[in-house]
Image (cartoon, grey):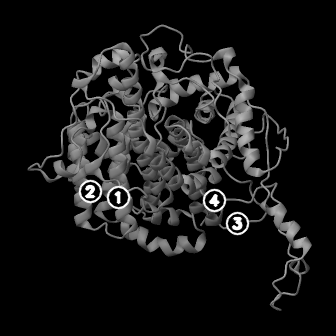
Amino acid sequence: MAMSTPLSQETSNPSDAPTGNYLEPEHHESSSSWLPGALLDVDALDFTLTSAISEWAQLPPIPSIPSLTDTGAFLTPSSTQTAELPADTVRRKWFTRLTVPEDMPAPQNSSGSRGGEVGQGNLAADENYRTGLSQRLQPRMHDEALPSAEQLNLFANQFFTRFHPLLPIVHVPSFKPTTENSLLFISICSVGSLFVGSSHAVAQGTRLFERLNKAILASWESVLARSCSDALSMVQAAIIGQTFAILSGRPKDLILAGVLHGTVMAWAREADRNALPLPSAPRDLDSEEASLDDQWSRWIDREQRLRVKIALNIHDAELASLLHHEPICKHRLSQYPHLASDALFTAPTAVRWARVYQLTTTPPSPRLSNTYLDNILPSDAADSRFAAYGLLESISAHVSEARRSNTLDNQEVGRLSNMLMWWWRRNSTQSTLHGEDNDPFALQILWHSTYIAIYADLDLLEQASGRDGESAVQASYPLVRSWSSSLAASKCLIHAFLLQRYVEKMRVAAEPAIHIPRGLFHAALCWFAFTRIGGQQGVDVKAFEAPEVQLSDSHAAPPGSLGKVGRDWILADANQVHRLIDMLSRVGRWGISSSFASVLCAAIEGYHGA
């Protein structure tokens, strides 16, 4: 797939890059100054994608003109005509439930097509069978023209202003759309389409996402063989595409994200083999302009690769929690990537970057400490909010690993809780925990969500709600009732309440972080199991004495705000699940939020009808 012609006649040298308008609101230049405008060759982008897919399919693309207003079934399959058991209704609506596409031809079962009767040991394949194999191996092609350059620029603008703060793996000041990074640009546009506010734009973004997947799978080998920047751009495109898949609300996308996660990790590992030389240390920085541009480029390459690793850790933890499997990454906390400060990453020019860079210090070498956790957890994660985010997700991955390996005993619970409290104390002085405007990652919510996973077997609670059908529901009820009467369940619900309170404090204009829908869903699931299945009316007051609850309350604004009012609310209100469902609907930027709400509503209705 040839990708040598720039999409814009402007240079892509970092020194000529825009000045990071998306991240510096006080800068009053046009936020679209980086965009190629009329110089963006949409036909070239379209040809790049189509050529890659067609080369993979070994046939010309088949034109397809679907309805532009048809957004497809993003949430749940259509209802069946026959009566279902309540749990079977939940199973049908589950957010990971795959269905056969309507345009999928029914398999033909003909014994004659195999060249002989079944059971006679005839292994010969006749011509009809060969023809059928050829048709089955031929990819089905659905292609259409890309949106206009104006639409693509709108999508990209929305991505950088609305989504990029939630997953900052692209260096905005130096980014320029070119043919070499066209896959990344298309991936950016697919996610940006979700923020335009129209179903037409969402449908366009979904089709971009689907074409992008085919193009990457068709061209990854040739891209990795080219320059290091091409390979890195492809990995970034894949990670952004994986994020789209996780949040879209379509079961096939979520399962695809789980299937391709290990592949993207392998691509990232291979892409790192040809990374640029390491940047100079701050004290060795050459201030000469030509040399400064080169050193900035090398630093950008290095920083983006580190952020890619953290993004993969985040995806790994999210997928492990959503799909209830063990993490793929090792999540070695003592070897966590050291990221630059946020101010350094958003420096708009090489000169501004050099000024900040020279004030930084080289990451210290690992050294032994008197505190055990200081030796296994990085002490510099607080320098970057994104690093703190990734570290917290990695601790969450350790919870999933312990849960899946059946090692989550009291000792392991204590160890994981100590790690979480250590993380809280390390970050409690940072704006990451107190400045809502400065915390796009909503780390308090993720912190409480991780404790929910410690105190509740969410896989079991999903079974009890109907995920696997009626038989699994009946088998899980005794275990859920036993859990609901435990102290762990009461601790779990306190964290669910605190998580809910943080979401309620979010500004209306704030974009929900990637993990927020999952956190709300798990909180509602715990309330449903506790009150409806377990029949409990209030939490055990001893749960308020948990060390992490005391720690969280002491850092609240004002301290001790959980107090008697909050405790009375938790003790008296058994209808929190309905509030959480409503919140899922209101933070429904992501399709998966609506999917979660639909599943919970079906579970409640099914339980009432049981």
Q: Which mark is residue 399?
A: 1
Q: Secondary structure at mark 1?
A: helix
Q: Amino acid at mark 3?
A: Glu
User: Of 97 and 466, which appears nearest the observer?
Assistant: 97
Circle 4 crowding by C-alpha within 10 Å: few under 14, some 14–19, many from 20: some
Please give the residue where the numbered disc 2 appears in the rendered image: 416
Mark 2–mark 3 distance (CA, rounded to whole Å): 42 Å
Please give the residue where the numbered disc 4 appears in the rendered image: 97
Q: Amino acid at mark 4?
A: Arg
Please give the residue where the numbered disc 3 appears in the rendered image: 84
Q: Secondary structure at mark 3?
A: loop
Left or right: residue 71 versus residue 563 is right
**Residue 597, placed above or below residue 8:** below
Q: Quadrant of the C terminus?
A: bottom right
Mark 4–mark 1 distance (CA, rounded to whole Å): 25 Å
Q: Earlier in the sequence, mark 4 or mark 2?
A: 4
Q: Secondary structure at mark 4?
A: loop
Circle 2 crowding by C-alpha within 10 Å: few under 14, some 14–19, many from 20: many
Q: Is residue 18 visible?
A: no
The single residue placed furthest to the top in the displayed view is 28
